[in-house]
Amino acid sequence: MKSPKTRSPRKPKGHGGERREEILDAALTLFSQKGVQAVSTRQIAEIAGISQPALYAYFATKDDIAAELCVRAFAILGQRMEAVRVDYVPTAEHFERCLRVYIDFGLDHPDAYRVAFMLEKSVDGSFLEKTGGRPMIAGQAVFAVFAEIVAQFHARGEIVSDDAIAATQSLWAGLHGLVSLLIARPEFPWVDREQLIATHVAMLRKGALK
Amino acid sequence: MKSPKTRSPRKPKGHGGERREEILDAALTLFSQKGVQAVSTRQIAEIAGISQPALYAYFATKDDIAAELCVRAFAILGQRMEAVRVDYVPTAEHFERCLRVYIDFGLDHPDAYRVAFMLEKSVDGSFLEKTGGRPMIAGQAVFAVFAEIVAQFHARGEIVSDDAIAATQSLWAGLHGLVSLLIARPEFPWVDREQLIATHVAMLRKGALK
DNA sequence: GTTCCAAATCAATCAGCGATAAGTTATCAG
DNA sequence: CTGATAACTTATCGCTGATTGATTTGGAAC
């Protein structure tokens, strides 16, 4: 008798990158349900149908799994932002739609958003350093698209601030504040979420556009 | 020979609440430097000069230590907000001054702000749930003062949104976004800090006031 | 069909974590 | 001095992320 354990017997060898995708699928499910910190590598391995050390053949650390999911999520955000950017029309409605794309993404992918923008710093190597800064690089690419959107309005003299970069950073901060608080403080007695988002987007638009 | 360990010998018994304060001081320092998650109870105990289990005579869990620091930070912010609230005058300048009080607090006490608003979720159940909701209650008290400020302008019909609470939450999110990003991402290529704060405060004021 | 090798996977293990249990020491009342 | 109580200790538990070295697997070569 090799083992009385309840875990399913060893799966056949993963062909090509399938096993890697299975790990990412398992991790995404668990991360979304319980958060990155609360999920152990053993839980991921069990869902993926492999032993816990086998994870390390595909990812150097648990954070690398989160980083991979993060980069993929930000690729989605970048696509959404770019899609709404190319439809540029100089209207307040379009401007608000751009802001909403960012908020909706953060609320749809709270774990990815947390990984990219809400992790605490660390003395000896932050998460971003340990994962080669790939999530942050992906995040800056998204920021660049956002800056382009603001620049389009600035070029037409529609932005209040004469400094388009300052306006972009301020708007980004305004968006980030709502997303991060809704993610980090779900217990807070928020007003209806849709109403809050509408109020916030309207406030930022009215404050930023002439 | 009882022990060849290098740790300092046992300290005299802590009189009254001194030992508790020493623990809080050690924890605040470490939390600020490395983040709550990255700090172990053993590290806190060593700085405080006691053994690690001795912490549990004063705090039920590690999160309780963070919660205590969180509540204290909220108390300081609440006092500042109340001080600026009682000087109410119905001008845009006063409104912006109220917003700046919040931003200045966050930038003056980044460690306390981080503990109060930027903590990660804990293992099972949120940080706020495990600590009996005391930080959330303290936060709501601060929020109430801020809501009072907004209500003073709302009562004079100066607020754009017809829902004063939604406007308050939106403004708070806007402030938090700038403070938390400046604290968490100091390496980002921000524009001049004073200019950014001025732009942000002006944007929020223009977006929230008629 | 057999042999062989490299990749894939595993059980066993490590140091460190938060937290608990049980025994020891310091302090003080009588 | 004695007993009780609170403070503190060492030792330990079950867990974590990660590493090591042995074992199994699948396919290519013959």
Image (spheres, coloured by chain):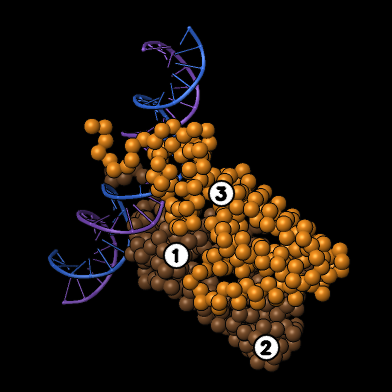
Chain colours: A orange, B brown, C purple, D blue
Tell us which disc is closer to us: 3 or 1.
Answer: 3
Q: Residues within 10 Å of mark 1 (few under 14, many from 20)?
A: some
Element at badge 1? loop
Distance from disc 3 to disc 2, alpha carbons, whole Å, reads 44 Å
Distance from disc 1 to disc 2, alpha carbons, whole Å, reads 35 Å
**Mark 1 residue type:** Ser
Q: Residues within 10 Å of mark 2 (few under 14, many from 20)?
A: many
Count of number-bearing discs:
3
Query: Residue B23 occupies which quadrant of the picture?
Result: bottom left
Can residue A120 be seen in the rendering of this structure? no
- Left or right: A175 with respect to A19? right
- Left or right: B91 with respect to A103? right
Give me the residue at 28% from left, 40% from top: A5
Query: Residue B192 occupies which quadrant of the picture?
Result: bottom right
The numbered mark at residue B153 is 2
Asked if marks 3 and 1 touch (Cβ < 8 Å), the reply is no
* Residue position for label 3: A69
Give me the residue at 35% from left, 62% from top: B56
**Mark 3 residue type:** Leu
Q: Is residue B177 above or below residue B157?
A: above
Tell me the subunit letter for badge 3.
Answer: A
Can residue B57 be seen in the rendering of this structure? yes
Distance from disc 3 to disc 1, alpha carbons, whole Å, reads 23 Å
Q: Position of residue B9 (x, y in %)?
A: 36, 52
* Residue position for label 1: B126
Tell me the subunit letter for badge 2.
Answer: B
